[in-house]
Image (cartoon, rainbow, N blue to C red):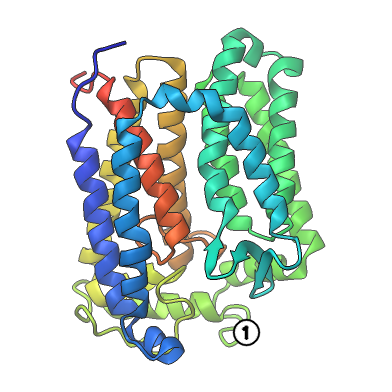
Amino acid sequence: MNNEKQPDKTLLFTVLALLAFGLIMIASAGVIYSQTRFGDGYYFFKHQLFYGVLPGFFVLYFFQKIDYRFWKKFAVPFFLASIILLMFVFVPGVGSRVYGASRWIQLGPFSFQPSEMAKLVIIIYLAAWFESKGSQKIKDVMEGLLPFLGIMGLIGFLIIKQPDMGTLFVIILTSFAIFFVSGAKLKHLAVMGSLGTFTLWLLVKLEPYRFDRISSFLDPGADPKGIGYQISQALLAVGSGGFLGLGLGHSRQKFNYLPEPVGDSIFAVIGEELGLIGSIALILLFVVFAMRGFRVAKNAPDVFGRLVATGITTWIIMQAFINIGANIALVPFTGIPLPFISYGGTSIIFLMAAVGILLNISKFSDLSE
């Protein structure tokens, strides 16, 4: 196919707007946290800019230049590498345990979060695998459903061992969307939903802290100084922002009241400083991203492109919804970053790689339809 055009500029500018929004909010939300931890009020801002956003621009540029079909050849090696890296987080001296979770690989000054890589790799792998199967084999229990459940079980086991429920939910929902678009039977999707519900119930029963999170979600005020502290502080921040907000830089909750103000809780600071207006503006940017991403998927020239575009768009939108929902008590708090906004170099790099691939698919898609 040689009908390559320009990438979707609306999609590109939306991502650039989200990145700019994120840098501004990290500079504001992290000023006290940075000063307390590192003696530099703009440590998080500078680290995000120089180790996340700027390298991310180069990653996006190169990935949007590479024909998206190129990644199909490496789907299996990348998947195997991702599995190995997810195992490495448990290796003493290699894996790093922070706040009771083993999610990082630490090699000297270099740190890396394999689960962020897994989000993108599983999309490419499933897209290549489903395309090779064809719609008829996907509908078969032995050829489609059971192998898919096996893949999900393997990835799910490694991520829940970290533990990282938020990432697990994002990967499962993204994979579910790819499976659906590839032509899966509705009754197979229903089986997956039932198994997922049972697994969630089992995970909650096995770990008391997960049950506590459900309890704090159902009644955030029941234990505001204990398990419900983070959601109580987030709701206080969002509520005090009102319609117009307290003004950029004028958050009170970021003064060491709100845990992780540049990470999981950054939307609460946005609500406090920029109010309902600023929160809606951010949500609208994600809505535009979703509309353009799914349009690219709908008009992709082949099955692989359609599935990859669907997966990338679903991943980013679902992760945004879970983060925002957790900060306003619509879903239980899972501790997952807000895409393009929250602090985190690994997250930004792989998000930009994913957007680069999505932009390349848009070059071959007829977006005029």
Q: Looking at the image, which is closer to me, 33 or 254?
A: 33
139 is higher (above) or lower (below) than 178: above
State how many labels appear.
Answer: 1
In-image side of 162 versus 20 (left or right): right
Q: Nearer the viewer, residue 141 or 221?
A: 141
* Place of residue 66 in the rendered image (x, y in percent of width and height, measured from the top left): 35, 29
Residue 345 placement, left or right of 151: left
Return the residue nearer the eye: 134 or 220.
134
Where is residue 322 drawn, in percent x and y?
Answer: 48, 55
Vertical comparison of 116 with 185: above or below: below
Q: Position of residue 173 (x, y in %)?
A: 55, 41
What residue sits 59% from the left and 49% below the top? 169
Q: Is residue 189 depicted above or below 270 in this figure?
A: above
Going by the numbered disc 1, the residue's amino acid type is Gly
Give the structural element (helix, strand or loop) at label 1: loop
- Residue 358 appears in view: yes
Residue 163 left/right relative to 261: right
Location of the N terminus (image quadrant): top left
Q: Percent x, y for residue 228?
A: 58, 78
Figure quadrant of residue 65: top left
Residue occupying the point 68% across, 19% down? 144
Residue 306 is at least partly visible in this image: no
Q: Quadrant of residue 190?
A: top right
Badge 1: how crowded within 10 Å, few (<14), some, or many (20+)?
Answer: few
Q: Kindly identify the residue that appears in the image at 76 percent across and 66 percent down.
A: 92
Q: Which residue is mark 1?
A: 226
Farthest front residue? 108
Q: Is residue 271 above or below residue 331?
A: below
